Amino acid sequence: MEKHNDILHILIDRETLSKRVDEMGKQISKDFAGKRPLIISILKGSWIFLADLIRAMDIDADVDFMAISSYGSGTNSTGEIKLIMDLNRSVKGRDVLIVEDIIDSGLTMDYMLKLLKARGANTVTIATLLSKPSRRKIQIPIDYVGFEIEDKFVIGYGLDFDEKFRGLKDIAVLRPEAYQN
């Protein structure tokens, strides 16, 4: 799967990813020392990042999942946020850490922040593997950023195009002709 004709080039290799995720896990552990946060992974793209991040942390945490979409099957956000799968745990009075694969427009994270605060979360902190600041429509506070990237369509390490490429061990740029039909 690593050598695929639809890949333009590797943007972030697996060694660089691993090193940065370990650094993030150590910082999160330090910042949440003495607390037991509720980590919310946004499916589907963030589960690989979450697995590596939580193994890099040395604090106890509860984990839950939400599925939210603003994309459908295309490469651009529709702007309409859909809650596909909700939490199994209450966030009331909890320190929450949202783990996301990529933040571009900020619309999904803005929705999440408002939702979790309305549900009574004590604090809401955001960790994202990738950030595309040039695409931001809503400025949101991002506490932990793995990498800032340019406006390219990326795949791998949990990120997909039409449910493909999640299993790539690196983060790669998808060839435009692969999705511009």
Image (cartoon, grey):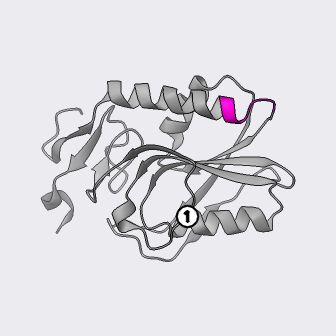
Return the x and y of residue 172 as percentages of the image width and height: 25, 42
**Residue at image x 59%, y 24%?**
55
Kind of element beneath mark 1: loop
- Magenta residues span 30-34
Q: Residue at x 34, y 69 (%)?
A: 76
Which residue lies under the disc numbered 1?
Answer: 140
Q: Amino acid at mark 1?
A: Ile
Left or right: residue 14 compared with residue 144: left
Task: Return the residue nearer the eye: 110 or 50.
Answer: 110
Q: Magenta span has 8?
A: no
Our reading of the magenta stretch's main secondary structure is loop
Q: Nearer the viewer, residue 155 or 104?
A: 104
In this rendered view, identify the residue nearer to me: 6 or 20: 20
Q: Quadrant of the N terminus?
A: top left
Q: Quadrant of the C terminus?
A: bottom left
Q: Residues within 10 Å of mark 1 (few under 14, many from 20)?
A: some
Q: Residue at x 65, y 50 (%)?
A: 125
Q: Residue furthest right?
A: 93
Q: Is residue 124 above or below residue 172?
A: below
